[in-house]
Image (cartoon, helix red, strand yellow):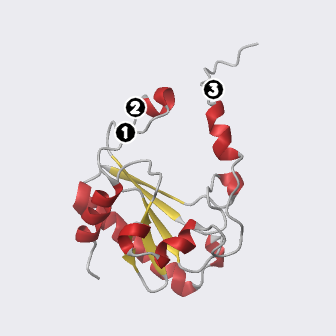
Amino acid sequence: MTDGFERLWTPHRMAYITAERPSADAGDGCPFCAAPEKDDAAGLVVHRGELCFVVLNLFPYNPGHLLICPYRHVPLYLDLTDEETAEFTALTKQAIRALQAASRPMGFNLGMNQGAVAGAGVAAHLHQHVVPRWGGDMNFLPIVGQTKALPVLLEDTRQQLVAAWPQA
């Protein structure tokens, strides 16, 4: 029986799905607890706020893929204090402005995956994705070649965004 769908089988993705995740404990393998403890370049930190920080995604969907994270190790948006929520939101807006200035994207994907079942790679530490998008930025490479073509190095992207970060 056919259901009208064509399928692209990607069994290599099971390694990601079944991979051991960092524990719920702060610092225990959590990349978002480790990043702000490093210098900005080593931690890929773009901006440090009082309660939250902005970091480049180590495995970006597109150049400039940013993550907004609270310093505090909490898993859910509802766990943020009112002050953390305000800064989290303000940094999201600043990230969009910096990306607009640095690379003029045509649009953005914004989102949080709450819990491993929702797709969070690091479910134990809240983070919001800010992904810049351009027309035609996706092609066959990720699907057929299991390759993502990124035309700029992470450190070059970090430096561009630091230079373009709104001074607030």
**Callout 2 secondary element:** loop
Mark number displayed over residue 149: 1
Mark number displayed over residue 55: none
Q: Are marks 2 and 3 in contact (CB under 8 Å)?
A: no
Residue 105's x, y, as percent?
29, 51
Residue 60's x, y, as percent?
44, 51
Q: Is residue 104 above or below residue 53?
A: above
Q: Residues within 10 Å of mark 1 (few under 14, many from 20)?
A: few
The type of residue carrying mark 3 is: Trp
* Residue at position x 34%, y 71% in the image: 94
Front-most of residues 117 and 20: 20
Q: Are marks 2 and 1 in contact (CB under 8 Å)?
A: yes
Residue 55's x, y, as percent?
43, 67
Question: CA–CA distance between discs 3 and 1?
Answer: 21 Å
The type of residue carrying mark 2 is: Asn
**Callout 3 secondary element:** loop
* Residue at position x 51%, y 64% in the image: 128
The type of residue carrying mark 1 is: Ala
Q: Are marks 3 and 1 in contact (CB under 8 Å)?
A: no
The mark nearer the N terminus, 3 or 1, is 3
Residue 91's x, y, as percent?
41, 74
Classify residue 168 as left or right of residue 21. left
**Residue at which label 2 appears:** 139
For the residues carrying marks 3 and 1, which lies nearer the camera in this image? 1
Q: The C terminus is located in which quarter?
A: bottom left
